[in-house]
Amino acid sequence: MPVEHATLEDALPNGIDLGSNAFLLIHGWTAGPLLLDFVAKAKKPLVERPLTAAQLAETVHMEAGPLAILLRTCSILGYVAFDTLQDTYSLVPGPALDELEAQLGSSTPLAQALRRIYAEAMPPFKLPSMEATRCFEVWTECRPLWRSSSSTTLSVLLDGIVLAPLLTSITYFARWSEEGLDYGKDNSMDSFNFSELDAASRAALGGIFQELGVGTVTPEGILTMTPKGSLALQRCYSFYVPTSYSPLLSNFGRILTEEPGWGFESADPDETEIHVKRTLNVVGSGAQHQTLFKDMMRHINIVF
């Protein structure tokens, strides 16, 4: 646990830089449903005493396997501690845990808005679309709540819940079709035309790219990337495989409390792989391999 936590903390001081720490956004998006259910369902019994994963599962009527994953995530992020001798989990009291509760308590408007992202904005989606509008609405209306958080870590992780699906979708449809056909556009990340977005969405998008420091959006919706930004945006190809599991994450509450084999155990052939968006997954795997080989060849050419 100390290694992962230190790595996360070390990556945060200068905020999000798509060229160096874009992984923080996808960490936030992946951890989001787990943190929401931790605060809403799993945290309370740990206030009283440390518990093993099995004891906690019995207490809160959850499935032990998914709950163990949830607890492992919270341990990595520093919200719970694991006693290797007793095999128990306990809360880590302090400002970070208090802030998590304040931001993601089940009755807060923020928690409800973030859950809607997972339910209603599964990438990839086109801009404009209902999914994109949902992301922009949450960013505009709710981001001020978590941006002012005393926990920089939590603030960046929550950024990822909105930005990961949005950046996945923007970069995906710049180069690939809905069926996964690569258009072969070498300069696909240099500029984008979002003139069909409404004014509020264009303003939100402009604010996002200005804050990321990778491009600017005109009032008419033309996004122009900086040379560095165009390259940095390609880092978002690494988001595709994780975000392809959006159906799984949107059903995490069900998996945690009712059906741990959801999406994997079904006698109905029509329900195979309902846990993943297969086209996005395949495209993402290929894009990562291409990037890996390109980087590898660059280093080989330097040597030889």
Image (cartoon, rainbow, N blue to C red):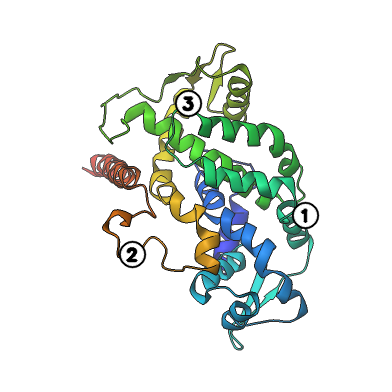
Please name the residue shown 68% across and 62% down the image: 40
Query: Residues at badges 3 and 2 in contact (C-beta under 8 Å)?
Result: no
Left or right placement of residue 152 versus residue 87 in this view? right
Residue 123, percent from left and from top: 44, 40
Q: Which mark is residue 102?
A: 1
User: Label 1's element?
Assistant: helix
Q: Judge depth for marks 3 and 2 and give the one in front.
A: 2
Crowding at mark 2 (Cα within 10 Å: few <14, some 14-19, many 20+): few
Q: Among all residues in the image, which is located at the extreme left?
A: 304
Q: Amino acid at mark 1?
A: Ala
Q: Earlier in the sequence, mark 3 or mark 2?
A: 3
Element class at badge 2? loop
Query: Who comes first in sequence, dot 1 or dot 2?
Result: 1
Is residue 5 placed above or below 129 in the rendered structure? below
Determine which residue is flagged by label 2: 266
User: What's the amino acid at mark 3?
Assistant: Leu
Q: CA distance from mark 1 to mark 2?
A: 38 Å
Asked whether residue 78 is in view, the answer is: no
Spatial distance from mark 3 to mark 1, Cα to Cα? Answer: 32 Å
Image position of 192 with respect to 157: above or below: above
* Residue at image coords 32%, 33%: 178
